[in-house]
Image (spheres, helix red, strand yellow):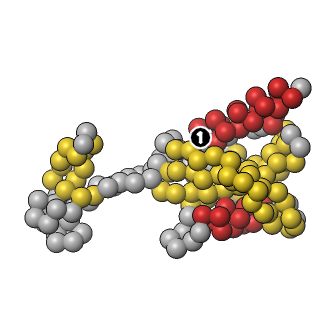
Amino acid sequence: MEKEFTYCPKCGIALAPRNDEGRRRMVCPACGFVQYINPAPAAGILVREGDSVLLVQRRFEPYRGLWVVPSGFIEYGEDVRDTAVREVREETGLAVEIDSLHAVESCRDDPRGNTVLVLYSGHVVGGELRAGDDAIDVGFFPLLDVPGIAFACQRRILRALQCEARDRG
């Protein structure tokens, strides 16, 4: 959950709300520090085999038991591509390579805070499919028969792929 500071992290003076170009921001009246509450960046890889897609069932809240495209938060100092590959390996046991950028989506339905998901398309190059890290289960699902998906941004991405699959017949 995004949290506003009460006091300035630079000088310790109490922050005050200010309208900053139509947005409410907490600002230090002494030193001018402005608290920006930005989304957390996340990355993942959409791995497909024909008209099936790799999904992971969430072990933890939020949305425990629902399914997601393998993805996770980018660590400070970590390259976004490395994060995407790492998350797939940790959650599914598969080694993957990135083929292309698939989508960049704003995600606003995570109770921990807003995120920006950088989602690549990729393919399997090794490993053994197994639920790992924060996954209960993992598997490939036909695009036209995916289980309940946790996050709205991923539902949008998968719906677009489902439409493409239906159009192909």
Residue lying furthest front? 100
Q: Position of residue 31 (x, y in %)?
A: 14, 66
Image quadrant occupied by the C terminus: top right
Name the residue beneath numbered marker 1: 153
Residue sitting at x 19%, y 56%: 27
Q: Is any atom of residue 81 visible in this view? A: yes
Asked whether residue 65 appears in the rendered view, the answer is: no
Residue 21 at what x, y percent from top left? 24, 42
Total number of numbered discs in the rendering? 1
Q: Closest to the observer: 108 or 112?
A: 108
Residue depicted at 60% across the width and 53% down the height = 118
Question: Would residue 80 appear left or right of 32 to someone viewing this image?
Answer: right
Give coordinates of residue 119: x percent, y percent: 65, 51
Residue 18, x across and y down, in percent: 17, 47
Instruction: State which quadrant residue 80 falls in.
Output: bottom right
Dividing the picture into quarters, in which one does residue 78 lie? Answer: bottom right
User: Which residue: 75% across, 60% down?
Assistant: 98
Task: Label 1, secondary structure: give it.
Answer: helix
Decide which of 142, 56 is in the foreground and name it.
Answer: 142
Quadrant in the rendering for residue 7: bottom left
Residue drawn 82% across the image and 26% down it: 167
Q: Is residue 137 above or below residue 32?
A: above
Asked whether, in this view, residue 74 is left or right of residue 29, the answer is right
Callout 1 crowding tier (Cα within 10 Å): few <14, some 14–19, many ≥20: many
